[in-house]
Amino acid sequence: MKKKEISKRVEELRKWMRSYQLDAFIFPSTDPHSGEYVPEHWKTREWISGFDGSAGTAVVTLHDAALWTDSRYFLAAAEQLEGTPFRLMKERLEETPTIAEWLNEVLGEGCTVGLDGWVNTGSEVRELQNELDAYGIEIVTDNDPAQDLWKNRPPLPEAEAEIQPLEYAGIEAKEKIGLLREKLQEAGVDGIVISQLDEVAWLTNLRGSDVHCNPVVVSYMLVTDTQAILYLDHAKATPQVEQYLKSQGIQRKEYDSLSEDLSHYDKDSILLDPDHSNFQLWLLLNPDVVVYEAPSPVASMKAVKNEVEVKGFRQAMLRDGVAMVKFLRWLLPAVQAGGETEMSVSDKLEYLRKAQAEYRDLSFDTIAGYGPHGAIVHYEATKDTDAELQAKGLLLIDSGAQYRDGTTDITRTIALGPLTEQECIDYTLVLRGHIRLAMVKFPEGTTGTQLDVCARYAMWQQGINYLHGTGHGVGSYLNVHEGPHQIRMNHVPTPLEAGMTVTNEPGIYRAGSHGIRTENTMLVTHYMEGEYGAFLQLEPLTLCPIDKTPILTDMMQEDEIEYLNWYHQRVEEALSPYLNTEEKVWLKEACAPIAK
């Protein structure tokens, strides 16, 4: 993108701001549905700044402009912002002011800051307003400059919705809506607006292709004791979908008609999730309506998979495992032959997954980090950074796919040749953490926070830690990242329940050297019932060998070796029937037992 074009846009924006008596405007990286991936229509931060990273906030004043982003994008942002009116603000560095602090510095008391209430959550707007109140700066939320200034702005996604068959969904939409109404009744609330697209998709048993890597459709849903309204544009609703919605007791209205319906909402109370519902929804409601602020109950309902969804996961993991085995068998000879890069091996893995039945898409952009790039947790190779793989060191590849019956997420770190002693030590520590968490048994009511230490204990004894979470939920042909449960150090109050999926992905990252992560998707299952109540365990759904080459067996405990051998036996038995003779031979060696 030409830097002159960005400068021109900023000047046009400043004229627009003056006409609305605004001293600054804030552009986040979000959309009205708090999605991880944002449709092109809402990429206003990229439009105004030219910075195309996935995280960042741009702020433009009448005389200045700045963009905040995290360490993943410091280099890329500096390059993309050079020659534009924007200066780079490096988040989480001591010398970097917050947006509120910076606005106070460059504006001062009595000024007005604009933002689009449709793309900022209730919590975000209130938090910022509280900070700016201390400086005497006001926020207004009723303008979207991109609507007036963005020439050829991409339209809202127009792809048709599709029905997720009962053979994959397991429970009819009308039954799910009935269960939601029971939850609302228990909470003493008359209705709810559901904003998150994966929650709408799960509740209605609809899927789509509106969002990168997430099989969802742009929509809202309003559910009360008497109505269930899906706000979905008519272009996306085929006659089959229209008929289906009627059969499930769901009324369809146009996407933008939610505003009018909320302004005429005639119930006494409504539930809005302040962390995931956009701020504009509060403003639309009559002041007499009591807003009950709480997490959406759909998140917890969706997190516990039914028997059909669990079966689908098993089938999806089986196919994904076959693709992974074909990939791993190909990888080392290909690297030794030369010419392979981070991007080329990512393409190869995607090609092998596409050959599997029910494949629909990737579940996220593949992370393939060789050597030092593996130490960048959310690294994504570009043409400028694409490293050629050599027959030495470690390749970290974190990938997944969307299948019609399940979503996969797996990380393997592979030795491409000789390793240093430190690489082997770190690899073994990560593997030990992965196995200790995989083996844990725990009572009902336990949270992921209480289990997190299992994955970190071995590395903690060596003074090593990692800063990301250890595990997240995985959707059923839905978003690869879902809550409300997690396994992480900071407190997450949602307990793990039988039927939940959760990843197990500890790691060690050494800047400039290497990164290591081993990840399986797990299923929470019943373990036993006894004198002290019900206990749960984690069953691996992912089926793929773990590279044994870097393991220092002297560092391993006997029960950890037993678990790895058991897991590999399970992998071989499950995948062998779907492989050819040469692949079976390779898998047998990859899954052969180890000993101290």
Image (cartoon, grey):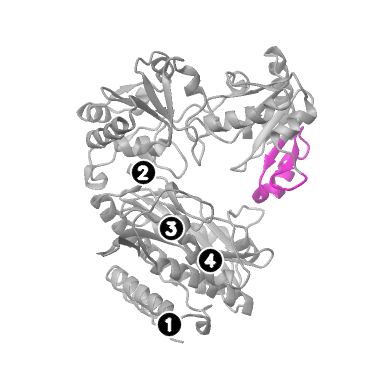
Task: Provide the residue designation for mark 3.
Answer: 503
Q: Are marks 4 and 2 in contact (CB under 8 Å)?
A: no
**Gap in Å between the C-alphas at discs 3 and 2?**
17 Å
Work out whether mark 3 precedes mark 2 in sequence or the reverse, and give the earlier one: 2
State the image coordinates of residue 197 (x, y, percent, origin top left): 41, 36
**Gap in Å between the C-alphas at discs 4 and 2?**
27 Å
**Gap in Å between the C-alphas at discs 1 and 4?**
18 Å
Q: Are marks 1 and 2 in contact (CB under 8 Å)?
A: no
Task: Provide the residue designation for mark 2.
Answer: 300
Element class at badge 4:
helix
Asked which quadrant contains residue 290, the reply is: top left
Say which of marks 4 and 3 sits in front.
Answer: 4
Residue 339's place in the image compared with 200, above or below, is below
State the image coordinates of residue 343 (x, y, percent, origin top left): 56, 57
- Provide the residue span drawn in magenta: 67-95
State the image coordinates of residue 48 (x, y, percent, origin top left): 66, 30
Q: Amino acid at mark 3?
A: Thr
Element class at badge 3:
strand
Is 16 left, or right, of 446 in this rendering? right
- Mark 2, Cα crowd under 10 Å, few <14 / some 14-19 / many 20+, is some
Q: Amino acid at mark 1?
A: Glu
Say which of marks 1 and 3 sits in front.
Answer: 1
Q: Is 81 a magenta residue? A: yes
Residue extending farthest to the bottom is: 596
Task: Provide the residue designation for mark 4.
Answer: 456
